[in-house]
């Protein structure tokens, strides 16, 4: 991470005091988190700890109840004028969402479109890219995730691992600044996990900024620059993955790691 | 950027043909089904009894049936019935689409209007509604744009606009829109929320998500019940005599029946044409379903 030009020093993602309530349930309890450009941030923690909610707040699938989310220094979802927050229009929110690419646990591919159709949907219908150009971009991206031959298959003709790789290509097609992965391998058969992790590793090597929620602790150690342990809606501990996994400071982290390692 | 070289090749799910020949496949003696033969025989006897009773029965006046099957007013009646069905259905589909959008909107006023519309048109009988539309020109002799409680700006006599045909179409279409709106709503509700989230994540606007992602998937579940409703509408047109609209198939055949004092053969003529039109519609529905089932219904069998 070089810090020569001024814009480079603004973090890719910055959360300040983020809270999220679902009714009376306090899902996020004051999250402060900074992800530098090019950094791979991995969030681990028990289910229900708020990891997924955090990701969903970053790309505004969920509206935050308190705090600020900034991407590349830009406040997300609102403009602040005279100390008050004003809601952005849906158009502007859609525009902001393009900065982040999201990969879901259950793939969420569009079932009525082929693999290629899924990948070019954003470029053609959001970015208004000419169809021919989008198709060649789409084919390149499918080749990048190792699916060049399966461009014309529908999602239900693909394995889980293949579907998830299409989903990654679909997110990359919008050229996001940050990629968010919400347990991308949790719905996969064990023998298919590797092919998806390989694609993510390739993205890490390309210098993509990303936040990854996962239960694959070994993978977190391998690719992560920054590990976050969450429990009950708070960040209990964060640090460098190797140090934190070998010598967790918090007893809650220790207890969790002893169960999953 | 290095490209990923996953060890996995594309799965070859089609076994080479000769591989199947190498295996000695089981030779299975099919199970016998004596029950089916008995049932078939019994049914054949019943069917022949009924057919005999209908075909040679002089009370059915088959000569009259053949005489009027292609009578000009009957054929015109088929045309009018079809026209009423198609146009009223289009009115209903457009209204139902708007009602669903209103029902799902953030605007509480639009939501309430949609609810009230469905409540009213579903809650009153079609026959009553058709009578009302028939009386519309008497209730409101002039249709005009005017300042409320003030002078008229622009106006025409109502019966220039709301003719019997228009009244019939409005009556059938608006009533149907309430039912269709509920069918459409069910179709959209059945779609996983993840679809909207995935589309939002690539920055699609709400309108575009609705049109590109949700509608094509909803149509898959919407089409079969809508086909049902269309067939119901076809036969519902028989009620337009309430308006009164006097050119449709049912009215045309009963007019002839009243003239020649032979209701049964004319009923058979009407039934024949309703069946023909329904059959054609079912073929159309088959192709629509196949189109919107792409990628979701299991159509192709890869192994055989």
Image (spheres, rainbow, N blue to C red):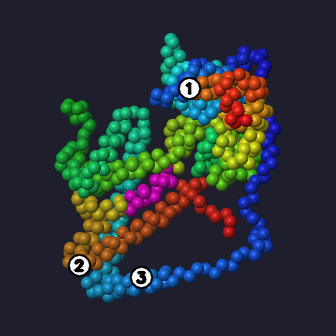
* Residue at x-position 77% and y-position 73%: B23
Q: Which residue is mark 1?
A: A28
Magenta residues span B218-231
Which chain letter goes with mark 2?
B
Q: Does B208 sit above or below residue B59?
A: above
Residue B55 screen position, x and y as percent: 34, 85
Q: Which dot, 2 or 3, sits closer to the camera?
A: 3
- Residue B118, percent across and down? 33, 46
Q: Which quarter of the figure is the N terminus of chain A placed in? A: top right
Do marks 2 and 1 share a subunit?
Answer: no
Left or right: B245 with respect to A151? Answer: left
Check if residue B169 falls in the magenta segment.
no
List x then y, in percent, for residue A28. Answer: 56, 26
Residue position marked by numbered label 3 in the rendering: B43
In the rendered image, the vertical position of residue B69 relative to residue A31, given as above or below: below
**Residue B249 lies in what quarter of the image?**
bottom left
- Of labels 2 and 3, earlier in sequence is 3
Considering the image in quadrants, where does the C terminus of chain A appear? top right
Residue holding disc 2: B262
Specify the farthest residue to the left: B138
Mark-to-mark CA distance, 1 and 3: 68 Å
**Above or below: residue A201 compared with residue B14:** above
Q: Give residue B115's quadrant in the image.
A: top left
């Amino acid at each position: 991470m070089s810090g020569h030009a001024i814009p480079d020093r603004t973090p890719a993602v910055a959360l300040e005091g983020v809270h999220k309530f679902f009714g009376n349930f306090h899902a996020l309890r004051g999250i402060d988190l900074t992800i530098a450009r090019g950094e791979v941030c991995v969030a681990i923690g028990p289910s229900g700890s708020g990891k997924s909610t955090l990701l969903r707040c970053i790309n505004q699938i969920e509206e935050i109840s308190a705090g600020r989310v900034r991407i590349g220094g830009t406040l997300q979802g609102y403009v602040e004028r005279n100390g008050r927050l004003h809601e952005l229009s849906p158009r502007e929110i859609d525009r902001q969402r393009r900065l982040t690419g999201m990969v879901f646990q259950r793939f969420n591919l569009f079932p009525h479109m082929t693999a290629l159709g899924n990948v070019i949907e954003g470029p053609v219908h959001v970015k208004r890219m000419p169809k021919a150009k989008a198709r060649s971009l789409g084919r390149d991206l499918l080749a990048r995730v190792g699916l060049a031959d399966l461009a014309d298959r529908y999602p239900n003709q693909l394995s889980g691992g293949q579907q998830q790789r299409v989903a990654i290509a679909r997110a990359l097609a919008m050229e996001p600044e940050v990629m968010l992965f919400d347990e991308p391998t949790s719905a996969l058969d064990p023998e298919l996990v590797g092919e998806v992790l390989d694609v993510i590793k390739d993205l890490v090597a390309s210098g993509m900024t990303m936040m990854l929620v996962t239960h694959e602790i070994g993978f977190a150690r391998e690719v992560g620059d920054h590990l976050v342990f969450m429990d009950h809606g708070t960040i209990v501990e964060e640090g460098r993955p190797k140090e934190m996994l070998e010598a967790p400071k918090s007893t809650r982290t220790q207890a969790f790691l002893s169960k999953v390692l | 950027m290095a490209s990923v070289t996953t060890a996995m090749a594309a799965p070859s799910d089609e076994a080479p043909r000769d591989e199947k020949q190498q295996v000695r496949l089981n030779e299975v003696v099919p199970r016998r089904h004596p029950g089916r033969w008995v049932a078939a025989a019994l049914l054949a006897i019943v069917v022949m009894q009924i057919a005999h009773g209908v075909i040679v029965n002089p009370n059915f006046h088959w000569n009259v049936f053949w005489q009027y099957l292609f009578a000009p007013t009957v054929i015109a009646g088929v045309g009018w019935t079809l026209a009423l069905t198609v146009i009223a259905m289009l009115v209903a589909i457009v209204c139902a689409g708007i009602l669903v959008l209103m029902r799902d909107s953030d605007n509480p006023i639009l939501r309430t209007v949609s609810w009230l519309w469905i409540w009213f048109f579903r809650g009153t009988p079609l026959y009553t509604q058709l009578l009302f539309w028939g009386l519309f020109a008497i209730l409101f002799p002039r249709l005009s744009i005017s300042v409320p409680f003030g002078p008229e700006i622009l106006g025409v006599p109502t019966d220039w606009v709301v003719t019997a045909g228009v009244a019939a179409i409005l009556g059938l279409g608006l009533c149907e829109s309430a039912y269709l709106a509920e069918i459409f709503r069910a179709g959209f509700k059945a779609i996983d929320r993840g679809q909207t989230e995935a589309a939002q994540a690539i920055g699609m606007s709400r309108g575009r998500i609705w049109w590109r992602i949700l509608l094509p998937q909803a149509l898959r579940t919407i089409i079969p019940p809508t086909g049902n409703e269309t067939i119901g509408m076809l036969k519902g047109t028989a009620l337009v005599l309430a308006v009164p609209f006097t050119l449709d198939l049912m009215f045309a055949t009963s007019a002839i029946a009243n003239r020649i004092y032979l209701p049964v053969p004319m009923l058979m003529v009407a039934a024949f044409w309703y069946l023909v039109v329904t059959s054609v519609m079912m073929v159309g529905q088959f192709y629509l379903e196949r189109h919107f089932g792409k990628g979701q219904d299991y159509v192709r069998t890869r192994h055989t």
